Amino acid sequence: MHIQEKAAILSNATFVYPVKFYLSGFSDVPHVQYFLYLPVFCLYIYMTVLGNGLLLSVIYLVNTLHTPKYMIVFNLALTDLCWSTALIPKLLDTFLFDSRYIVYEACLSYMFFVWFFLGVQSWTLVIMAYDRCIAICFPLMYHSIVTKPAIVEMLLFVWVFISCLITCMVGFLNCLFFCGSVVIKSFFCDHGPTFHLACNDNSVNYITALVIITTVSFPPILIALTYICIAIALSRIASGQEGLKALKTCTSHLIIVAIFFLPVIATNMAVLRIINPILAHTIPTLHNPIIYSLRTEEVLNSIRKLLHVQLFLKDVV
């Protein structure tokens, strides 16, 4: 397209969309598909799909786990599964099978679901921190404050709010002109690398990106504040042994928070600069089901009970 033709299109406010985008990924890293993408796929199948599937099934089938705490865990496992399923299969198709071109509409859908489930998961960790904070700081009022309806309302608000926010983010991309490069310098249809390809003013998209980043990044601050409250409460009302016992109930949550947010913080480290973007998007979903099934006595006992019932029924039949 000539410069004159571009100007005419811009003056008539006709939006120019590419038929396809090209995902460059880590094209300058030799054999990256073998030492990175293939292991991620194996871990995705065995740990994310099977692990989260097992955790969701156990929570759904065991009535004793139908509590506010495990409603939050169920939501976390569900968003883990959805997030990794939105990201990893397409990532493998793109780079393992060298299918780097993606249709414009599919790219926007890809972007929506990855960022949507990222945001929901991030704020689910905040709700989980809130649950632990009330349980330790106000133990006598816990069951009157943290109720099933209250948790449902909080989770529903997160899903609706994040959905509206990400819809606006993706929708504003349709107001851009893409008349130059179609190469997205990322391993998926990320928002920043995509709107930077636009030929016209992208200030609205830049502001939206800041809002999204703030929305996803603000949870660590809230989680840190809840644990400061927990530490203060324990220092005032509990003995050393009781304090350790109370903190033990938070270990699974703290581990997941660390796994979820530390890869993002480590982005600027030179050693992790190449592989960190993928690690930041995949490692949390690979570890969460293990942490909440192998480190939680209630879940382990529930799995044993389910297996015992199944074996009993098999013997009867």
Image (cartoon, grey):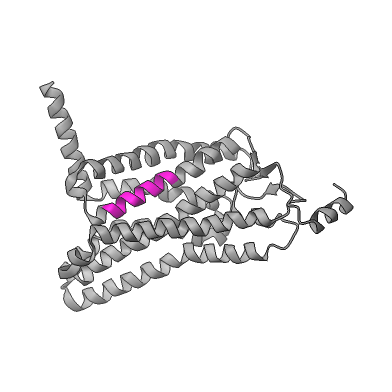
Find residue 125 and report its horizontal and vertical position in percent: 36, 59
Locate the C terminus by quadrant.
Answer: top left
> Which residue is at a point 18% across and 66% down the rendered structure image?
144
The boundaries of the magenta stretch are 71-82
Against 200, is 133 above or below? below
Res. 176 image quadrant:
bottom right
Identity of the residue furthest to the bottom in this view: 236
Find residue 241 and report its horizontal and vertical position in percent: 16, 67
Find residue 38 and report its horizontal and vertical position in percent: 51, 36
> Which residue is at a point 16% across and 73% down the rendered structure image?
238
Between 304 and 36, the one nearer to me in the picture: 304
Against 230, is 168 above or below? above
> Most prominent secondary structure in the magenta stretch?
helix
Res. 140 image quadrant:
bottom left
Find residue 226 and report its horizontal and vertical position in percent: 32, 70
Asked whether 2 falls inside the magenta stretch, the response is: no
Identity of the residue furthest to the front in this view: 12
Against 307, is 162 above or below? below
